[in-house]
């Protein structure tokens, strides 16, 4: 079945990259601010290392949040600037999983998936399976195993 469908093409940011860069920028800003801290101006019980750790935590999380917010804004702008195209689509209406697998294998081998299945395409096991009856279905269970005791 062939049909035409409408698709929208747009640019989309990678959220993890924006959030990671925001966190790294927050860490760098915390490091620079730590250089300007006067150790004598710190309250009693606090050291420069504790202040730097607090700055690092707050600014890294803040940078992570701001990077994600920037990515969301860029994604929103990208949706507004999306371009719409009409393309041809081929839709296969096949529900049988074996048929889908056969078609994919044929496409992977460079063959025509719509070609009729020949006798050379079936293996000996499949050919023998065609002669089974419903009473043979009990023999499909694994052999050489003891029956379960129910425990």
Image: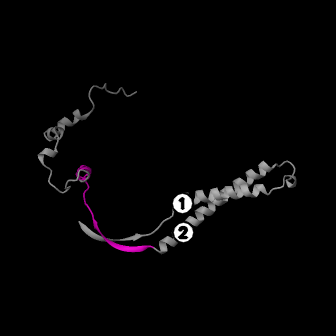
Crowding at dot 2, Cα within 10 Å, few <14 / some 14-19 / many 20+, comes out as some
Magenta segment range? 82-106
Q: Secondary structure at mark 1?
A: helix
Q: Residue, x 54% and y 57% (percent of image)?
A: 16
Q: Residue at x 67, y 60 (%)?
A: 62
Please name the residue that numbered disc 2 is placed on. 74
- Distance of label 2 from label 1 (alpha carbons): 10 Å
Q: How many marks?
A: 2
Tell me where residue 71 sits by quadrant. bottom right
Disc 2 on helix, strand or loop? Answer: helix
* Residue 107: quadrant of the picture: bottom left
Name the spot of residue 141 as percent of width and height, x first.
Answer: 26, 33
Q: Which label number is shown at residue 51?
A: none
The one of 49 and 44 positioned closer to us in this rendering? 49
Which of the image's four quarters has the C terminus? top left
Residue 122 % position (x, y): 16, 44
Instruction: Decide whether residue 10 is among the magenta residues.
Output: no
Q: What's the residue at 41%, 69% (across, down)?
A: 9
Report x, y in % for residue 64.
62, 58
Position of the N terminus by quadrant = bottom left
| Depicted 78 relative to depicted 140: above or below | below
Q: Could you say which is closer to the camera, residue 37 or residue 45? A: 37
Q: How is the image coloured?
A: one colour
Left or right: 52 as drawn, with respect to 4: right
Q: Please tell me how crowded label 1 is: few (under 14), some (14-19), or many (20+) other residues with Cα within 10 Å.
A: some
Q: Is residue 87 magenta?
A: yes
Sooner in the amino-acid sequence: mark 2 or mark 1: 1
Q: Position of residue 74 (x, y in %)?
A: 54, 69
* Pointer 1 residue: 15
């Amino acid at each position: 079945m062939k049909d035409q469908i409408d698709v929208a093409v747009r640019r989309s940011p990678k959220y993890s990259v924006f959030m990671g860069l925001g966190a790294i920028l927050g860490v760098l800003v915390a490091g620079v601010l730590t250089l300007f801290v006067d150790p004598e101006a710190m309250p009693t019980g606090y050291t420069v290392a504790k202040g730097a750790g607090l700055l690092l935590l707050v600014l890294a999380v803040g940078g992570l949040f701001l990077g994600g917010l920037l990515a969301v804004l860029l994604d929103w702008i990208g949706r507004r600037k999306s371009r719409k195209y009409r393309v041809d689509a081929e839709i296969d209406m096949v529900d049988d999983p074996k048929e889908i697998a056969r078609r994919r294998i044929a496409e992977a081998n460079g063959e025509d998936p719509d070609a009729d299945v020949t006798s050379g395409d079936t293996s000996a096991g499949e050919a023998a399976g065609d002669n089974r009856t419903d009473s043979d279905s009990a023999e499909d269970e694994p052999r050489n195993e003891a029956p379960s005791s129910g425990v």
